Image (tube, rainbow, N blue to C red):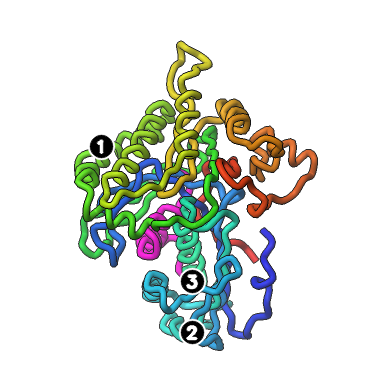
Amino acid sequence: IAPSKKMQEALPEDAVQATCVAPVNIAVIKYWGKRDTKLVLPVNSSLSGTLDTNAMRSRTKIIASRSFKGHSMTLNDKEVGVESNKRMMSVIKALQSMACDLVKEGKTIVKASEWPEFGLKITSDNNFPTAAGLASSASGLACFTKCLAAVYQIPDTEITKLTAIARQGSGSASRSLHGGFVEWEMGAEADGSDSVAKQVVKEEHWPEMRVLICVVSKGEKKIGSTSGMQASVQTSPLLEYRAKHVVPKRMEAMKAAIRTKDFDAFAKLTMADSNQFHAICLDTEPPLFYMNDTSRDIIDYINAFNATKKDEEKGGLRAAYTYDAGPNACIYLLKDEMEECLAGMVKEFCPKGWDPENFVYDPMGISSYGQRKKQQKKQGFSYDTLPDSGVKMIIVTKIGAGATILKD
């Protein structure tokens, strides 16, 4: 991944730096609601799939130096406050408490106690629409946590503790530190020490799994997840019932389905949980409308696709939709079903006169659309030249690794 110009600037003599990429994760058992807003402790456990960073990722570079006055940050080339951001500062302070000595060739260059003297220059970007229901805060805060941990010389063996710290920045960020399918345990301790994310299976476990992201909106949501979920906690009786009586059983059933690669069970649970999450949004006062007409059209398409079985004896569902707090659809399906489903979605949702190869974004070439584009040596994809309404693009991806430090 080529660094931006801002990531290539001259460094102070005492500079310590690291660069990280982190993935989007898409929950199949949803997190919605906090029992402690300060520590970001959820009312229920959740489970997600980590998506490959080759299609969608956050990237962060951090340079630490005593010569920097305070902390500064740019996100997608726009300046954002750090010291006024309570969640980011809580992550920084928590990581400073875990920091280790920087040692080179047997000589201590920076003592663990000296890291608070270093200002931070943070440069971050996403290669997908920010704050549009595509879990940008999760990938961004996971990336920031992993990157700063590397600067502070915190070893990878502390990954479970890092998930608890990332959680304080953005709840779902805890899950983006791991690859594969990941469980965020709600925990029971008041201090949140046991509210951590753990890997259920590695990214290699279910290699046939594919994911289609239907981008319906590339703008920010009218009502953010943080305020929306707390309104649900305060006003939705359904949320409390779900947290106590539904999610615990679904979590166990989902982990079993993933471990045994039972797609039919996986798909049923995924769609049921998405539907219930949005039912809670409607049960909130005032109601929360995250999906739109195009979102519901995609549900109709997937239901129709599932109704047509290639093998009547085999039976079972062929694809599963799920929606986070936004109108964008995530479709989980297996490799053998992807081409037919994707071709049908292009036929149904690609605007007339629009080139399908500028509608399907597949940088890894795992679909026929992506393979043709690679063969034709076409490069790039612009989020600025997308259809005005309906489905704007379809991103083709798969399950991938968690947050990763890039080598120089």
Quarter the N terminus occupies: bottom right
Which amino acid type is marked by label 2? Gly
Question: Taking 28 as reference, is 305 above or below it?
Answer: above
Instruction: Identify residue for label 1.
Output: 249
Which residues lie in the magenta part? 154-180
- Of badges 3 and 1, nearer the viewer stands 1
Instruction: Identify residue for label 2.
Output: 70
Q: Is 240 or 207 nearer to us in this picture?
A: 240
Name, please, the residue furthest toward the right: 376
| Residue at 21% over, 59% down | 189
Instruction: Identify residue for label 3.
Output: 153
The residues tagged by marks 1 and 2 sit, at their Cα atoms, a distance apart of 47 Å
The residues tagged by marks 3 and 1 sit, at their Cα atoms, a distance apart of 39 Å
Whole-percent x and y of residue 258?
40, 35
Which amino acid type is marked by label 3? Gln
Q: Left or right: 173 with respect to 104?
A: left
| Residue at 52% over, 40% down | 204
